[in-house]
Image (cartoon, grey):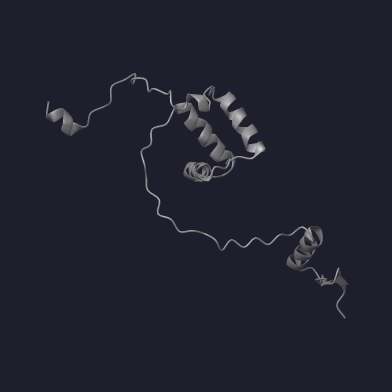
């Protein structure tokens, strides 16, 4: 007869089979905390490369935030935009704290009140011309 714990059969540990022992120990340790997450709701999308211009320090904060969460910059931007389109905040309190730290580190002193007042400064060095443009001059 198979022994049971909380109505579930215990996996027998036989000999030196480390896989069975390991599986048994993991089952015992996480019993009651395992949550099966089935993500059948994946959506297929077509992504495009874009040349968006963005304020330098904002980009640094976004890239650092993405790296911290092991995400791509595109994933972070898509998440922010989709939440904003729904009128929801995209960040948890912990994420907002991380963003405050990153803003301080990268000396980003802009907030939402600056969003419609940003004006790009002229480039410090002229853009390099390609060989075809130089021939026409």
Going by the image, does 47 lie left or right of 26?
A: left
Q: Nearer the viewer, residue 131 or 107?
A: 107
In the foreground, 31 or 25: 31
For residue 22, above or below residue 115:
below
Looking at the image, is 87 positioned above or below residue 23? above
Name the image quarter holding the C terminus.
top left
Of residue 38 and residue 84, the one placed in the foreground of this image is 84
State the image coordinates of residue 105 (x, y, percent, origin top left). Answer: 58, 25
Q: Give the percent coordinates (x, y) of residue 117.
A: 43, 23
> Seen from this angle, which residue lies furthest front?
87
> Residue drawn at (43%, 26%), measured in percent from left and top?
116
Image check: 137 left or right of 107?
Answer: left
Relative placement, left or right, of 100 versus 43 is right
Total marks shown come to 0
Tell which residue pokes out farthest to the left in this image: 136
Q: Residue at x 48, y 24 (%)?
A: 114
Pinpoint residue 74: horizontal percent, then vertical percent: 47, 44
Quarter-wise, where is residue 52 in the image? top left
Examine the rendered structure and indicate whether residue 66 appears above or below residue 109: below
> Viewer-proximal residue, 92 or 105?
92
Give the residue drawn at x 16%, y 33%.
132
Q: Give the residue at x 37% y 20%.
A: 121
Q: Quadrant of the N terminus?
A: bottom right
- Where residue 83 appears, x then y in whole percent? 54, 44
């Amino acid at each position: 007869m198979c022994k049971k714990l909380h109505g579930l059969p215990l996996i027998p540990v036989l000999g030196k089979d480390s896989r069975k022992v390991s599986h048994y120990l993991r089952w015992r340790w996480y019993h009651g905390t395992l949550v099966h997450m089935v993500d059948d709701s994946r959506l297929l999308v077509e992504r495009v490369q874009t040349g968006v211009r963005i304020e330098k320090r904002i980009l640094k904060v976004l890239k650092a935030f993405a790296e911290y969460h092991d995400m791509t910059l595109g994933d972070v931007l898509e998440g922010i935009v989709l939440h904003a389109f729904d009128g929801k905040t995209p960040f948890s309190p912990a994420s907002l704290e991380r963003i405050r730290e990153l803003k301080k580190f990268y000396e980003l002193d802009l907030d939402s009140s600056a969003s419609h007042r940003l004006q790009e400064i002229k480039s410090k060095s002229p853009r390099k011309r390609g060989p075809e443009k130089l021939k026409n001059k």
